[in-house]
Image (cartoon, rainbow, N blue to C red):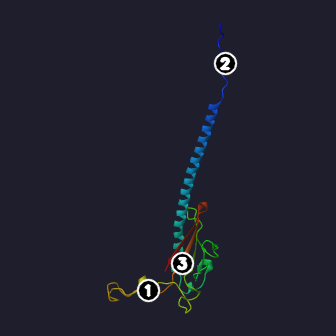
């Protein structure tokens, strides 16, 4: 008579367990890579939004500088006024990125917080070669090449021979360069330059 064979379980090799662990580790790496890619994209989009906001905030500094310039006389504009961020020469060495933007000393702080966390500073340069009157013989200034280009001339009215009245009088002035620096959230830094007459 033959003995029945033993049905004792065979020793398992564990290959399925090893394959499963490798698959789980591979999936974990894939999930981590996807999260990093998503987080990176969101960070880039957020940084671009902050940069755009900071550049827009530069308009506040430009407008405040323009208002200051409009209220000044030609005599007041012939000399440096560093405490209010005004310089009567074009300063060819001026570089906004290396300039000392000390508010109240070299620049003017338009606002310390515009509501979005932006600090706005500005500085103004008259585009002339030397300090002094606009009309000095040695003075070289950047200015409109023709007064007619900025609206001077006679009108077509009854006082000037046409429909609008007397002739328009334009006081010659040089151009001014307004440079605005905006320091925003997430170390955002933006510069805006405007040339105005």
Circle 2 residue = 8
Dot 2 or dot 1: first in sequence order is 2
Q: Secondary structure at mark 3?
A: strand
Q: Nearer the viewer, mark 2 or mark 1?
A: 2
Instruction: Tell me how far mark 1 sits from mark 3, CA to CA.
Output: 19 Å
Q: Where is residue 110 shown, x and y percent of the image?
A: 57, 71
Q: Residue furthest bottom?
A: 137
In the rendered image of this protein, does residue 105 appear above or below residue 26?
A: below
Instruction: Tell me how far mark 2 sits from mark 3, CA to CA.
Output: 93 Å
Q: Is residue 68 left or right of residue 162?
A: right
The quarter of the picture where the N terminus appears is top right
Quadrant of res 30: top right
Question: For the point 66% across and 18% down, which residue is it?
Answer: 8
Q: Where is residue 180 shown, x and y percent of the image?
A: 56, 72
Dot 2 or dot 3: first in sequence order is 2
Q: Nearer the viewer, mark 2 or mark 3?
A: 2
Indicate which disc residue 147 carries: 1
Quadrant of res 115: bottom right
Cβ–Cβ below 8 Å for labels 2 and 1? Answer: no
Q: Secondary structure at mark 2?
A: loop
Cβ–Cβ below 8 Å for labels 1 and 3? Answer: no
Cβ–Cβ below 8 Å for labels 2 and 3? Answer: no
Dot 1 or dot 3: first in sequence order is 1
Indicate which disc residue 26 carries: none
In the rendered image of this protein, does residue 182 appear above or below residue 149?
A: above
Indicate which disc residue 177 carries: 3
Quadrant of res 22: top right
In the rendered image of this protein, does residue 178 appear above or below residue 27?
A: below
Q: Where is residue 88 shown, x and y percent of the image?
A: 58, 83
Q: Residues within 10 Å of mark 1 (few under 14, many from 20)?
A: some
Q: Where is residue 111 shown, x and y percent of the image?
A: 58, 68
Instruction: Tell me how far mark 2 sits from mark 1, CA to CA.
Output: 109 Å
């Amino acid at each position: 008579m033959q003995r029945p064979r033993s049905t004792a379980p065979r020793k398992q090799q564990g290959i399925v367990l090893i394959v499963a662990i490798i698959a789980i580790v591979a999936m974990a790496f894939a999930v981590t890579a996807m999260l990093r890619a998503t987080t990176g994209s969101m960070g880039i989009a957020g940084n671009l939004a902050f940069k755009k906001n900071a550049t827009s905030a530069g308009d506040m500094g430009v407008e405040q500088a323009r208002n200051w310039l409009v209220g000044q006389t030609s005599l007041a504009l012939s000399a440096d006024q560093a405490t209010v961020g005004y310089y009567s020469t074009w300063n060819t060495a001026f570089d906004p990125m290396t300039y000392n933007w000390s508010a109240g000393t070299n620049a003017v702080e338009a606002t310390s917080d515009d509501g979005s966390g932006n600090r706005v500073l500005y500085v103004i340069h008259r585009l002339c070669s030397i300090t002094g009157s606009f009309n000095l013989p040695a003075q070289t200034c950047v200015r409109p090449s023709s007064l007619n280009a900025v609206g001077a001339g006679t009108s077509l009215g009854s006082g000037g021979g046409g429909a609008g009245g007397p002739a328009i009088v334009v006081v010659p002035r040089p151009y001014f360069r307004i440079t605005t620096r905006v320091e925003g959230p997430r170390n955002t830094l933006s510069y805006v330059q405007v040339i105005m007459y």
